[in-house]
Amino acid sequence: MVHRGLAVSPGVVIGTVMVLEDDIHRIQKRGIAEAQVKLEIARFDRAVKEAVAELQGVYQTARKEMGDEAAKIFLVHIGMLSDKRSFTVPVHAIIESERVTAEYAVSQVLGALAEKFQQSSDSAFSTKANDIEDLASRLMSHLVGRRESRLARAKPGTVVVANDLTPSQTAGIDRGKILGFATDLGGKTGHTAIVARALNIPAVVGCRSLMADARDGDTIVLDGDRGVIVLNPDARQQAEYSRYLDQRRVFQLSLTDLATLPATTSDGVEVELLGNIEFPEQAKEVVESGGKGIGLYRTEYLYLMSGTEPSERDHFMAYRKCVEMMKGRPVVIRTMDLGADKVVESRHGAPERNPFLGCRSIRLCLRDTPMFKTQLRAILRASALGPVKVMFPLITSLTELRRAKYILNDVMEDLAEDSIPFDRKVPVGMMVEVPAAALMADAFAREVDFFSIGTNDLVQYTLAVDRTNERIADLYSPMHPAVLILLRDIVKAARKHKRPVSCCGESAADLEYALLLIGLGLRTLSVSGTSIPSLKRLVRSVSIGQCERIARQALQFDSEPEVAAYLRDQARKIIPEAFDGRSVE
Ligand code: PEP
Ligand code: MG
């Protein structure tokens, strides 16, 4: 069975499905093999036993704190779970007769019971429905287990299938066991996808209905190059995939010699290729792939990966590691960009109605000056060790930029007072990733040392398309003429004020888009380490004049499909080997 989704992290793997259930209210009917029935019943019995033991503990505590009468409810729960006639026997029967998972059987039996209570005209009974809900949650948490621990228990050769994964769950994936993952939700530039690319984990997101068809133990082909999933492939599909993998290997091999060659166009212009990283360790891959520095260090992963707020020391150690690994090459450290799809449980608070338009990124920092200053101190201290640059994300107004710079100056004064070394002339830049900033690039260019264009957000805000929403993924297009016009104008403003401008959005790694960016005048592109070699191959295969002609022509179209088709056509002509085999299915 073939499913299609969004190709977000390249690589083709063949493995065994592990379904990661999440929402206990949406347990899907999932079949099991006949040989599995006994094990499934044992798993259910074990979960009941654990839940009863847990409830006994809760009952004892409640008795002490709330008295006998109030604690009785937990005895009722224990009674319900242990009731053979109305609960355990019917669950066993469903697992056996329908050959389904314990989760599904439990949801059926408890669901029917809750419905009975709800329909009762006696209010004493109808409120019991809530108790059942509570009981179901408790039991399910024992059956399903915490997602992180299920991921940690994965066997080698696993491909995870889930409704969604968070960026930090993705970052915690053990590559030794998990070959790749596919999710029903998600978009190409969501941070789950970005982390997958950064860590070289093949991934397909936005599959929409894969969870309904996949079962634990299925064989799965996950094609992260083309966004295709094949469940239980037949012989013909397997043969096609091995042919494609051969072609892929040949192309990858042809890139290995490029690392030491310059990224210079055929007419001798250098295009600086930098790396995007989330963790300092990734700096190594950037250097090995021939990257000339770090163009975007997404420091929010320091917060995402630890349950607590990082200390100045935590920040400093991470930045020092990165700066040392880069051995004199520049490192652009972006200040914390939390919020939207990068959330930390501890600062979760009340959910926002529109998190991408909410209190995220620089807005969060400007509302929490102590936290912001802690990070800035560490960045500045690291600037004494190598060529560090500071970059502020999501800048939307000059007031915001000025406040951020003011706080940075404050921190500089504190450090100077304490005689702590730092680079007084540390370059300060901003991301241009909101249309307001793009439209006012001329004014911003007077007040920063450099720009970095974040197409991931710029596209979402210009086109009003959530970058993580699979339902409208077809509308998320960096090729939209409105985006091209903004890019052209940002570069124009940067040139006028002689400010360097780079692009660090995911689109910079798309060969066809890179042609356009170079043609528009960009001379620095920052992409994940793995994308550097193919980008270098492209740079070495074109002249600036050629790229400029392509960009001029692309700006003439007024519909996104025309731009996309034209650029793809041009890229295919210039570097056909990168597209070989892409039509195989
Ligand atoms: C961007 O928005 O393009 C960008 C590089 O930042 P992030 O993906 O972290 O939002
Ligand atoms: Mg962004």
Image (cartoon, helix red, strand yellow):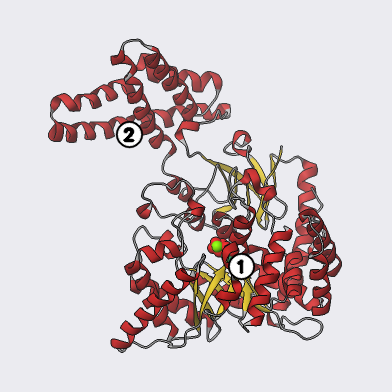
Q: Where is the N terminus found, in terms of image quarters?
A: top right
* Of 329 and 59, the residue lying toward us: 329
Q: Which residue is mark 2?
A: 50
Q: Which residue is mark 1?
A: 438
Q: Position of residue 274 (x, y in %)?
A: 62, 76
Q: Position of residue 226 (x, y in %)?
A: 73, 52
Q: Tell me the amino acid under the disc marked 1.
A: Ala
- For this view, does 447 lie left or right of residue 303? right
Classify the position of ligand 1 by quadrant: top left, top right, bottom left or bottom right: bottom right
* Of 292 and 525, the residue lying toward us: 525
As displayed, is residue 265 above or below residue 25? below
2 and 1 marks in contact (CB < 8 Å): no
Q: Residue at x 30, y 14 (%)?
A: 123
Q: Residue at x 55, y 70 (%)?
A: 431
Tell me which corner region of the image, top left, top right, bottom left or bottom right, holds residue 581.
Answer: bottom right
Q: Position of residue 410 (x, y in %)?
A: 35, 79
- For this view, does 545 lie left or right of residue 37? right
